[in-house]
Amino acid sequence: MVLITFLVLDVLLLYVARTGIEASREMHEKLSNGDLNPVNISVQNHYTFPISIKIIDEIPFQFQVRDFKIERTVKASAQDKVSYDLRPTERGEYYFGNLNIYVSSPLKLISRRFTFDKDKMVPTYPSYIQLRKYDLLAFSNNLFQYGIKKIRRIGHTMEFEQIKEYVQGDDLRTLNWKATAKKNALMVNQFQDEKSQSVYLAIDKGRVMQMPFNGLSLLDYAINSALVLANVVLKKQDKAGIFAFSKKVENRVFAEKRGSQMQKILETLYNIKTDFFESDYSRLYVDVKKNINQRSLIILYTNFETMDGLNRQLPYLKGIAKNHLLVVVFFQNTELNEIINKKTDTIQEVYDKVIAEKFMFEKRLIANELKKYGIHSVLTQPENLTLDAINKYLEIKSRGIL
């Protein structure tokens, strides 16, 4: 009888109010691929007593989370907020289910379920969080600070900017003698990086880009890097364009400098889809020759694991490099470092270590082979891809070799 009495009392406490609590899921309109995205849950307690809540959010199936649960205590007539992070590893549409909240009174004999925010879809775009990170630095011309740009500026380009008074440290070779005679003070010509140059970001979406690293494929790393680099290119007053290829060239955005270019590039990168076929470099060569008539900087995101793989595509890369400045960006297999640095105890481990060192050495041979034919290269780890690609672009701009 006592148990039944308390049970009835608990039911009355929880169900007498129609809206015992209010809750909502707060998040950005879109998720950033490969980054931690915060999800905030706000709970308002309308009961006149403290409650215990158990939050079970139906997270999209892509995350494969089957044990999500957050337990909290909310004071009487108070509001509480909880948050958690999601890291998507592929682009596309993510569907959230119900936000389920189970409420218990201090008696804790039963719990009442409340359901909020049914069936919400959130798209996952290429990493716009990285884009924002480098956006301010590019806008303020501070990409050479904070260790982002480690190379020395070599010489100067030949696009005239202004005549200014000489200060200590200016290049004496830029003295303007006519202006010096008129002003009766040392005057120098000041130059700036050449602008309105075309930069194309070519993304290989073939099978070599299917390799996973830390949850993301190499293709998604390349897409995230291309988004950030395109923004830096536009901030530097150059024209940015992109295209992707495997069996054929598609997802093309021609290099322009208009205000809507970044949004166009973002939507195109979001819609890149592939079945990871074998990439056809002959199609790439023909397409570049046909559609890119002006000498441009072409940054090619791809991956070569062996010299044989490079030699099959080298004639087409050499053909592109005749008319354009080609930079090949490819990846180190960082998982081999664990094998190389591991202490060996058996013959099998020695054999594995030698093979791993051979693969690492072959990557450096590939970079040297490209250099022989005037093709620039960036051999990078996936997590450093964006930084190294920006560095290479700024190096080319500072040297004026485009």
Image (cartoon, rainbow, N blue to C red):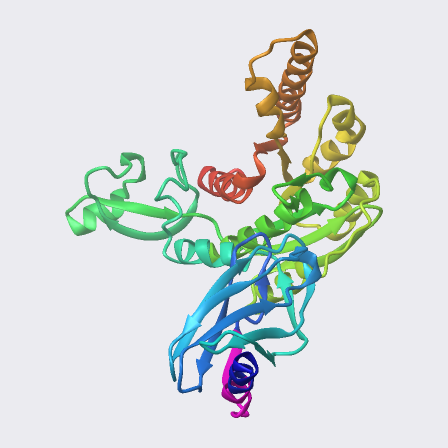
Residue 166 falls inside the magenta stretch: no
Q: Quadrant of residue 309?
A: top right
Residue shown at 58%/39% (left/top)? 382
Which quadrant of the rendered structure holds the N terminus? bottom right
Residue 24 falls inside the magenta stretch: yes
Residue 110 in picture, x, y percent from top left? 57, 76
Residue 198 in picture, x, y percent from top left? 59, 52
Residue shown at 64%/15% (left/top)? 353
Q: Is residue 141 visible in the rendered structure shown here?
A: yes
Of residues 192 and 114, the one nearer the viewer is 114
| Residue ranking furthest to the front | 1
Residue 390 in picture, x, y percent from top left? 50, 44
| Residue ranking furthest to the top | 347
Segment colored magenta: 11-25
Residue 127 in picture, x, y percent from top left? 56, 56
Is 22 located above or below residue 350 in the figure?
Answer: below
Is 190 located above or below residue 264 in the figure?
Answer: above
Which quadrant of the rendered structure holds the C terminus? top right
| Residue ranking furthest to the left | 184
Is 347 located above or below residue 328 in the figure?
Answer: above
Query: 300 left or right of 259?
Result: right
Of residues 14 and 382, the one nearer the viewer is 14
Residue shown at 35%/44% (left/top)? 145
Q: Quadrant of residue 251?
A: bottom right
